[in-house]
Amino acid sequence: MSKKGILLVNLGTPDSPSVPDVKKYLDQFLMDERVIDIPKLNRTLLVKGIIVPFRSPKTAKLYREIWDKETGSPLLYYSELQAGMLQDKLGDDYQVELAMRYQNPSVESALAKLKAALVESIQVIPLFPQYASASTGSVMQLVMELVSKWPTVPPISFVNSFHDNELMIKVFAENARKHQVESFDHVLFSFHGLPERQLLKCDHTGSYCLKNADCCQTFNDTNKFCYSAQGHDTAKLIAKELGLAKENYTVCFQSRLGKEPWVQPYTTDVLKKLAAEGKKRLLVFSPAFVADCLETLYEITVEYHEEFRALGGEHVQLVESLNDNPLFIDALAGMVK
Ligand SMILES: C=CC1=C(C)c2cc3[nH]c(cc4nc(cc5[nH]c(cc1n2)c(C)c5CCC(=O)O)C(CCC(=O)O)=C4C)c(C)c3C=C
Ligand SMILES: [Fe+2]
Ligand SMILES: [Fe+2]
């Protein structure tokens, strides 16, 4: 009997923390028309002429800080564990493959394995809880481009987002409890940032998102594909699970690239505000990711910690990501049709 194919796709990571490998990774990532969504000539000049040559040595240094001698990139390591655990959970009726949108294992190679196994259908689960054109949308586009060229196109389906998945919310809350939430002065939900332009593009009405200060803070039928609205909802659900009052947490956005406005408030501005208010200890969730990666293990754990201390704060504590938590694997299994 033929199997059902499951394709898990995360963002991607360089093959090694060397400058040439980081260059290759950033080049492929930032040349994606959904990531730097400007005309191709401008994108090429910006990415190949400025960002890749100047950013790669700096980014390679950061990757060296988080690279494990035995297991390599944390993002790839946890993604492989997740795929293996999901395969074990689903059993022989399924074939689970892992791919990275950028670099390796490539989406093309993972799809080729499913094709060779003559799977009867493919379900794609982009490993991003909140939908963004630059992440989920990009995975969907690439998979559709590749599969559309096959002589037999199998039944194919996509998970669009899972920002409110109950088991996922429980795992984030469970991971936070390990740090005694009540011992912190304030809690941050720091999401990966996104250019405001990309948020506006995903506003189907063309007249809702960013039209007033709190338009994305409530999740509703009009903004259900909005990355910011989904993020606020994820934060609200985790806060509810922990019994956190509204005044004790803040949703913010990190990792801005370039000079254009990105979704706000920026995490660095929130750190400044909280330090000025005399807050000393912060607990920080990063619920845009399902696995620890450069953005959590370096940007939050090292950079924001140091930044906050320099401002008079004492400690920034990261809440571990979903990683290899069996409940998260149950969550993934629950998404499988
Ligand atoms: C939530 C998922 C992600 C979205 C949406 C996203 C958008 C986005 N990212 C950049 C630029 C960079 N991101 C980088 C690292 C990075 N980004 C994500 C996820 C999302 N990005 C992850 C999981 C990681 C870490 C990967 C790892 O190996 O651990 C980087 C590289 C690091 C650096 O040089 O700072 C860049 C660059 C843009 C421009 C963008 C949306 C337009
Ligand atoms: Fe990113
Ligand atoms: Fe919005």
Image (cartoon, helix red, strand yellow):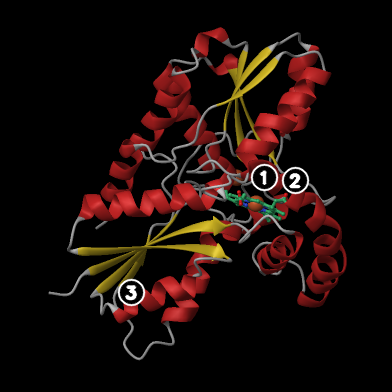
* Label 1 Cα neighbours within 10 Å, binned few <14 / some 14-19 / many ≥20: many
Choose the circle earlier in sequence order: 1 or 2: 1
Depth check: give the residue in front, 121 or 105: 105
Residue 79, horizontal then vertical, whole percent: 45, 51
Residue under circle 1? 193
Q: Dot 1 lies on which element?
A: loop
Q: Dot 3 lies on which element?
A: helix
Choose the circle earlier in sequence order: 3 or 1: 3
Residue under circle 3? 114
Is 332 left or right of 183, judged from the image as shown? left
Q: What residue type is labelled 1?
A: Gly
- The picture quadrant where one finds residue 34 is bottom right
- The picture quadrant where one finds residue 326 is top left
- From this viewpoint, which residue is outermost toward the left? 1
Residue sitting at x 62%, y 10%: 185
* Label 2 Cα neighbours within 10 Å, binned few <14 / some 14-19 / many ≥20: some
Q: Is label 1 within 8 A of ligand 1 (CB to nearest ligand atom)? A: yes
Depicted 269 relative to depicted 48: above or below = above
Residue 222, horizontal then vertical, whole percent: 50, 48
Q: Residue 256 carries which label?
A: 2
Choose the circle earlier in sequence order: 3 or 2: 3
